Amino acid sequence: MKSTRKGLRDGELHKDTYGRLTCSECEKTLKKRNDPDEIFAVRVCPECGREWKELR
Ligand SMILES: [Zn+2]
């Protein structure tokens, strides 16, 4: 799984005018899924289901 930072750099993600992470393909704001066992949060696009990890 790519990091959100890499996704932004690769153009898969961008930030909307409110600074929220958005899927470039679907124009959907990413949802956040917290896994208590992981050191990162998972950001999911509700449209295409792609996931990126967000380091905390
Ligand atoms: Zn998407």
Image (cartoon, rainbow, N blue to C red):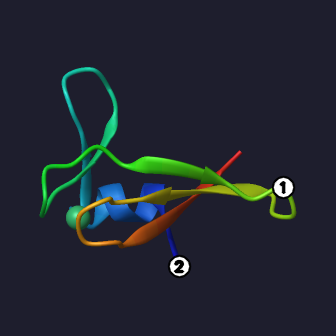
First along the sequence among labels 1 and 2: 2
Horizontal relation, residue 40 to residue 18: left or right:
right
Disc 1: CA contacts within 10 A as few (<14), some (14-19) or many (>=20): few
For the residues bearing labels 1 and 2, Cβ distance under 8 angstroms: no
Outermost residue on the bottom side: it is 1
Residue underneath mark 1: 36
Q: Position of residue 16 (x, y in %)?
A: 21, 32
Q: Which is more toward the observer, 1 or 28?
A: 28
Q: What residue type is labelled 1?
A: Pro
Q: Position of residue 44 (x, y in %)?
A: 43, 60
Tell me the SS state at disc 1: loop
User: Residue at the spot x=52%, y=48% of the render?
Assistant: 32
Instruction: Give residue 15's mark.
Output: none
* Nearer the camera: disc 1 or disc 2: 1
Mark 1 and mark 2: Cα distance apart in space: 17 Å
Above/below status of 37 relative to 54: below
Q: Which is more toward the observer, 50 or 10?
A: 50
Above/below status of 15 relative to 34: above
Tell me the SS state at disc 2: loop
User: Residue at the spot x=19%, y=23% of the render?
Assistant: 17
Q: In which quarter of the image is residue 38?
A: bottom right
Q: What residue type is labelled 2?
A: Met
Q: Does the residue labelled 1 lie within 8 Å of ligand 1?
A: no
Horizontal relation, residue 33 to residue 25: left or right:
right
Outermost residue on the top side: it is 18
User: Residue at the spot x=36%, y=49% of the render?
Assistant: 30
Residue underneath mark 2: 1
